[in-house]
Image (spheres, rainbow, N blue to C red):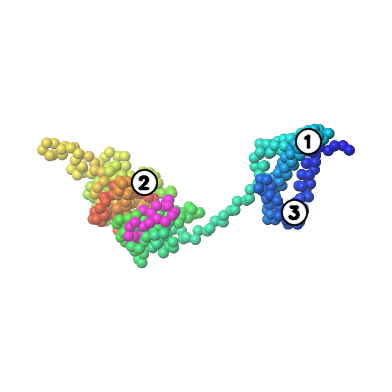
Amino acid sequence: MKKISYLKIFAILLLCFLTIFPIITFALEVTYPKAITGATITDKSDLAQYLKYVVDFGLSFGLAIAVLTLVISSIFYFVAPAIPGALEIAKDRISGAISGLLILLLTYLVITTINPSLSVFSIDSLEKIETQTPNTESYGINFYKSTGCSKADRTDTSSILDLGDLKNKVNGVKISQNSDENVYYIGILYDNTNYWGKCQYIDPNNNGCQSADVTAASASIYEYNFSPSNSGSVTIYRKSFNIVGGKEDNKNNGGDLKISQSNINGIYEVKLDSLRFTGTIGSSNCTVPETERTCVKWDDNGKCTSRQCPTLAEENISSIKIDGDYIVLLLYEAPSEEGGLIASYCQAFPTKDDVNKDGPQQIKWDAIRASGYDPNYILIIPVQKK
């Protein structure tokens, strides 16, 4: 009879194991033995786990056979002097066992070299697609009595002249932006009705809960305008004046500065002491009368010998006129060690509900002095017309 090599026997046994074992074990629903690697399966295992188990068990089985053959062959080798032909059998079996070990090692190296994941036979499960929870909050600015913004007490998309029952009770604010329709809200809280006084700018880039740092009595709410009209402008006057015959009285305005939309170009924020009453941005023609300009040099007798155009800092602003749809804020930005940005006074653009809608907005310096912070920044934001 032709001699069958141990390698062929191992291959036949492994083939039988791969084909018959799953049928028997799954049919009988027995407890499956663990492979040397620790892999095991149950009746709830998926295809990837089963394939890994079969491969691990096959390699474990082959390794066990090879080791057992080496042990038996070693015994034959030591008793060879007493048993004729034992030495030849020992050498043949040792050679076959070593060949089997080399084949197992080569198989493992090929698998891990070509693709390390093949040695695992893992099939990644599909990632669960999280169902997006619809936005249950109303679009606009939500007001909360609670600091954690747990449940909105009021939601608005337009300015509120008087917060009524919520006056001085707002502790949290949250903006819900309508990104689907490209509508983005901005707003300001005021500590007085009619949109003036100490205020807080609600950050439109923050969709989380924002604490209300002012005792809010009113709120201006607007939609940001991404494409404002080029004809819009904000004019700042050094002196207040009235409307005469439906026209502006420019004779005694004491100097002015016009900031056009081309200068604003989005959200405009600049220090007041970097702007001067020159009529327009970039002009060197001072609009303030010579005798009222800021003295920068005196002679020995105390007489002013050199003057320059006043800046917009300190209390040099008396009124603001807004042509177009803008929010104008005068802000005090403290040094970082003092807390950063503090909104000491805000000026909303004219709407039909504003008290002095037909003329320049008069700056209430008494209220600003009471706050203890003179503004040092101006902020202009283009908004959608209501």
Look at the picture and state if 83 lies above or below 60.
above
* Amino acid marked by disc 2: Tyr
Q: Residue at x 67, y 42 (%)?
A: 118
Closer to the camera, 40 or 249?
40
SS at circle 1: loop
Q: Residue at x 82, y 35 (%)?
A: 83
What's the CA distance linking mark 2 and mark 1? 100 Å
What's the CA distance linking mark 2 and mark 3? 76 Å
* Amino acid marked by disc 1: Val
Residue 159 position by quadrant = bottom left
Mark 1 sits on what residue? Answer: 79
Query: From the image, which quarter does the C terminus lie in?
Result: bottom left
* Amino acid marked by disc 3: Thr
Numbered badge on residue 25? 3
Which label's residue is closer to the chain start, 2 or 1?
1
Magenta residue check for 62: no
List x then y, in percent, for residue 102. Answer: 72, 35
User: Which marked residue is nearer to the observer: mark 2 or mark 1?
Assistant: 1
